[in-house]
Image (cartoon, grey):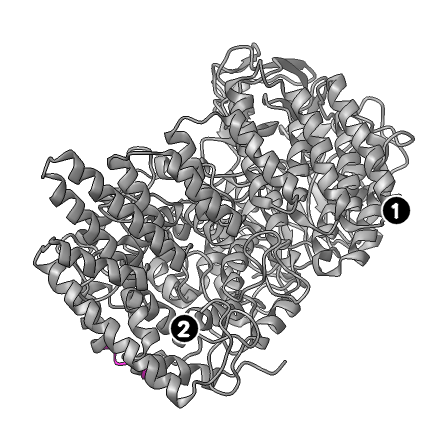
Amino acid sequence: MHGQPRKSLKQEDESLLSAKAEKLRALQSQFFANHRNRIYTQEALDLSAKLLEGNPECYTAWNYRKLAVQHNLSRSDPNYVAYLFDQELKLVENALRKNYKSYGAWYHRKWVLSKGHSSIDNELRLLNGFQKADSRNFHAWNYRRFVTSLMKRSDEDELIYTEEVIGENFSNYSAWHNRSVLLSNLFKRKAEEFPLEEKVLQEYEHVRSAIFTDPADQSGWFYHLWLIDLTVKNYAPLLVSSWPSHGSSITLNGNNCIDGCGLSLLNSTLSDTRTLPVILYFNQAVEGVNLSTVTVKSEHLKEDLVWKPLITNNSSTAQVWGAYLNLGNMELEQSKTYSIEIAIGHSMGIVSSNGYQYGDPSQIAFKLCVQSACTKPVEEQGGKLTSWKDNNFQKIDHFEDSDSTVTADLHIPTTSYWCMKAIEEEITNFRELLSEDACKIGKLSLARLLTALDLSTHQHDKRKNHTEEVLKLYTDLVELDPTHSLYYKDEHSLVLLQQITSSRESLLPYCHYYKDATEANTSYVCLRLQNLSLSRMGSIENLLWVQMLDLSHNELRSIEGLEAMQLLSSLNLSHNKFGSFTALEPLRSLKSLKVLDISYNELGSHSIDTRRYLCSSPLANTEAFDWDRFEILCGSFSSTKFWEAFLIFESLNLTDLNVTGNAVADENFTSFIGKVLPTLKWLNSEELS
Amino acid sequence: MGDLAAEKHVRYILSVEKKKDSFESVVMEHLRMNGAYWGLTALDILGKLHVVDVDEVVSWIISCQHESGGFGGNVEHDPHILYTLSAVQVLALFNKLDVIDVDRVTGYIVSLQNEDGSFSGDIWGEVDTRFSYIAICCLSILRRLDRINVEKAVKYIISCKNMDGGFGCTPGGESHAGQIFCCVGALAITGSLDLIDKDLLGWWLCERQVKSGGLNGRPEKDPDVCYSWWVLSSLIMIDRVHWISKEKLIKFILDCQDTENGGISDRPDDAVDVFHTYFGVAGLSLLEYPGLKPIDPAYALPVDVVNQIFFSK
C-alpha cells in the first residue's frame, strides 16, 4: 500500500469492496480453470485480459498469455499474427495505465517484441508518454534502453535526448545516470570521436550548472564525483610502496632477527620463523603476481618465492601481495651484506580487475646485512608482559641517516597537464560557490578536489599542500550536517593519517622507543597513534615497516587493511569501538603477531555485526568451518555462539592478550580463550599457569 | 514518538491471515508466499513465531510446489524464483528444510542460470539482478551453492554496477536501493564484497536519509519504511551504517506505526500492510532496537536461524 491514506472504512465502502472482491475471485477461478485446461479461445483470452487490466500484478495470467500466443502462432496467417501481437501490446498498454510499475506488464511487452513486431517507432512514442508522466520511472528508462538498442538508435542520439530531458528539468537523476552509461560506452567504443579530456571538461560545466542552481538537490552530486574520478584515475595498476623499500638495508642479528640499520626495531619477532616478508602494495587490486611477473635476483636464494594475495576470501585479485624469504635456507654468513633485487612487471601479466596491464615496470633493490650474533640470549617468546603505559615510552629526537627502514615512499606517477588544470579550475569554481553559499556539497566537493590535487601533485611539502584546509572543511561538515557526521569524521581520519605518515619528518613525533622497565639494554620503536580521535585506519601503505603499533584511545571500528603490516608483532587496540571479533579479521594474516590488547571495546555489546560479511566464513561461502579443529580445541563450547572468536583466534599465535572491559569477557569466554590459544602466556595482564 | 507497539503488530499480522476474502487479500493472493515470509519473519523477530500452526503452514507451502521443483506464489499459480526463495526461507524459520527434496529445488534454480551468469525469474526469461540474489541466497541456505557457476554469476552482477557505486536490474539500469540490497547481498553470500567500492556506495546509501529521518530508495525521492531494510542492510553489509543517524531513523519508523490497530505503513498516517510491517520491524532489529531478535542482513532471516544452518553440526 504505497501512499494510501490510513482510514477506517465506512459501512457502504466495505460492502462495495466485498462485492468487488467476490467478482475478482470469480474471475480468478475461471481463469485458473482455463489455464489448467489449456484453453486459448478468444473468450478465454478476453477473460484473462479483464483480469490483468484489473490486476496487472497477477503474473500467472501473463504467463498464460504467453502460452496462448505460442499456441496461436501455429496458425500461420500473417494477418492473424499481426493482430495477435497488437492485441498483446494493447493489453500491456492498458495494464501499464493501471500500474506503470508492473514488472510483469513491462516484461510481457519485451517478450512480445522479441517474437516479432510491426513498428518499433510506436514504442518510443509510447515511452515518451510514460516518461513525461513520470520522468524518473526506472522501468520506463530500462525499457527505453531495450528499445533503443533493438532499433539500433545511436548512443549519440540518446545523449542528445538526455540533454533535452535535463534541459527541461536538471533535477532528474535518472537522466544523469543514463548520461554516464552512454558516455562510458562512447569512451570505450569511440575513443577518437569522444576524447575523454574534452568531454569531461564539458561535463564539468554541464553538471556544475545543475549543482550551482540548487546545491541541495542531489541530482548532480554523484555525477560530479564520477567526473573527478575520471579526471584523476590511474587506469593502469602501479606499485605504491613495498617492504623492504627500494634502497633499504635490513640488518639481521645473528639469530636472523630483523633490525633496521642504526635504529633498533623490535627484534624478537621473526627469529623463530626465520623468514622475512616481502610486501608489494599496489594502487588497486591486481591479479597475476607470480614468478614470471615478479622476478628476484639473489645469489643466495635457494627457492622460488611464492606470492600470495593478502586477502582472506579466496580471491585471485588483491591490492597487497606478500611472499616470504626463507632465511634459514640461504646460508648467510655473519658480517656480510647480501643484495636482493626484485623486478616487478617487466613481463606482462599483472592486470587490474578492469583488464589494464601494470603500467610502470620497476625495481626494488635492498640489502640484507648479517651482524654478529646477539650477545644477550634471545628471550623465550612471551616471557614478559608488554606494558603500554606512557612511562615505558621515550621520544625519539631524530632518525639516523642510515636508517632506511622507516619510510614513506609513496610512488606517485606524474599527472597530465589537463587533469591538473581541470581540478584547479573546479577548485576555483567551488570556492566561488562557497563564497555565496556555505553549502554542504560545496564544502565536500572542495575537500575532495583539494585531496585529489594533493595526491596527483605529490605535494607532501607542508607549505604547499592543502591538508590543513581539507581537515578544516571536514570539521565544518560535521557541524553542518550532523546526520552524516561520522562519514565526515571517517574522511577526516584518513586525511589526518595521510598527513602524519607522509614523510619521515612527519612520522617522527609519533615514533617512540619502547623501554622495557626491567631490561635496560633493549629498546624497540613503537608507532604511537593513540588519542587522535581516529575513527578509521588508512595510509597503511606507509606503515609496512611497523612492528609495534599503539592505536588505543581512538574511535576505531575496524582495522581494514592491517593485513598488509606483516611485520607487526604488538598491537594495542584498547579503548576503541570494536564491536565484534569479525572486525579483527585482518589479524588472521599476521603470523608475527604476539601481543594484542583489545581491552575496553564493545565486543559482545552489539546484536548486529557490521563486519559479518567482510570476514571470510561459511556464511560467505569462502571457507568451511573447521569442525575437527573446533572439536579438538574447544569441543565443549557452543559453536553457534563462539564461531567468530574461534575463527579469529585459532589461527593466531598470541602470547599476550587482553580482553578486559568487554561485555563478552565473562568466565566462560576466558576459559574458551585458554583452550583456543594454547600459546598464550598472559591473559588480561595475568600470567597463566 | 511512542515505543514499538509490539503486541499490536503481532495481532495485526495474525489478523491479516484471517481476512482472506477482503479485496486487498484477493488482489494480493498471487504473492501469498511472500506475504507468509514477511508476516512469519516479523513474528519471529517479535518473538511470537510459536503462536503459528507449523504443520498448516508447511503443508500449504508444499502444496505450492510444482513438478519442476519451483514454488508458486500461491496454490494454482505458476512457479517462480521469487516465491521459491520465500518458501525456502519460511521452511528455514521453522527448521523444516528436511520436508522438501532439496535436490529438486536446487535443480529448478540451477536451470534458471543463463550463459552470461545472470538468472531468469522463471521459464519465460525475464532477467534481473533480483533473481541473481534469490538464486544465490536460496542455494546457500540449501548448502548447494557449488551447483551453479558462481564466478559468472558474480561477474554478471558486477556488470550492473554504476558510476555511483550502486547497481541496477540489468547492465545500464539505474541504481535503486532495493536492487542494491540484492546485489550487495549476493556478493556478501559469495564472499565478493571486495568488488564493491564501499566508500562510494556508502556515501550514496547514507545520503538516502532525508530530513524526517526516513530513507528513500533513490536521490530526490520520498522516504519509505521499506528502505529501512534495503538501505540499512546494505549499509551494514559494507560496514558503513554509522554514516546515518540511527536515532532519527528509529523515530521515523515508529512514527509510521498504527498505534491503534497495529501494523506499520510506508509513511506516517498511510494505510498499513504486512510488507511494511515486516520491513519496519526488520529495520528496527537492524538498528538494535531493544527486545527484538537480531536479523541477518544478507539472508534476511533471524541470526539464530542462520547460525543454526551454518554453525551447527
- For image coordinates 59% across by 70% down, the residue present is A663
Q: Are marks 2 and 1 on the same chain?
A: no
Label 2 neighbourhood size at 10 Å, few (<14), some (14-19), many (20+)? many
The answer to whether A93 is drawn above or below residue B150 in the figure is: below
- Residue B179, image x and y in percent? 46, 50
**Does residue A627 appear in the picture of this structure?**
no
- Residue A297, image x and y in percent? 57, 11
Q: Tell me where the magenta segment starts and ends, as one range.
A: B50-54
Q: Quadrant of the C terminus of chain A?
A: bottom right
- For image coordinates 74% across by 27% down, the residue present is A405
Corner quadrant of residue A541: top right
Q: Chain of mark 1?
A: A
In magenta segment, residue B52: yes
Q: Residue furthest bottom?
A: A11
Q: Which residue is tagged 2? A: B274
Q: Quadrant of the N terminus of chain A?
A: bottom left
Closest to the observer: A228 or A44?
A44
Closest to the observer: B269 or A259?
B269
**Side of A326 where A493 appears, left or right:** right
- Residue A389, image x and y in percent? 79, 55
